[in-house]
Image (tube, rainbow, N blue to C red):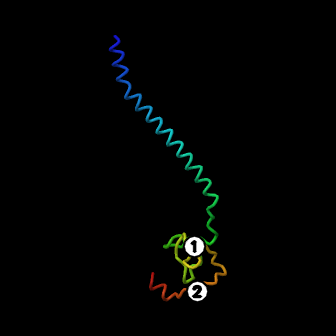
Amino acid sequence: MLKTIVLIIIGFLPSLWSLWVIRKTQQRTRTRSRQIAHNYSQIQQYIRPVEGDRYYLEGVGYLVGDISCKFNARSGYVRCAVNPSGPCQDCRHYEQRDLATSEKQI
């Protein structure tokens, strides 16, 4: 009778150990997810929102800045190489894009 009980206990030990490992892993994952969410919420305070000069151009996508400028990056994230954070208004580096040249490049 004692041998049977010992065999049953030994048979359940791997399953119990596996359940314990799974619970510890889930607990670590939840804790890490909470830390990431907390850090992300703190980081969002320092991210500067995109200013109002972002717009959608059909066939191209989202663009930032003045598309008529020669230095515009034609990107939704960076305005230009000269003044990437903007703003484009009253930029001293503004140069009108030559339309004939720009059509050849497209």
Q: Establish if 62 lies above or below 2.
A: below
Q: How many marks?
A: 2
Q: Residue at x 55, y 72 (%)?
A: 78
Q: Establish if 6 lies above or below 56.
A: above
Q: Is residue 26 left or right of residue 55?
A: left
Residue 85's x, y, as percent? Answer: 60, 72
Mark 2 neighbour density, 10 Å: few (under 14) some (14–19) many (20 or more)? few
Residue hosting label 1: 64
Q: Establish if 67 lies above or below 37.
A: below
Residue hosting label 2: 95
Q: Quadrant of residue 52?
A: bottom right
Going by the numbered disc 1, the residue's amino acid type is: Val
Q: Residue at x 35, y 12 (%)?
A: 2
Residue 51's x, y, as percent? Answer: 64, 69
| Front residue (pair 77, 13) | 13
Q: Establish if 87 lies above or below 3.
A: below
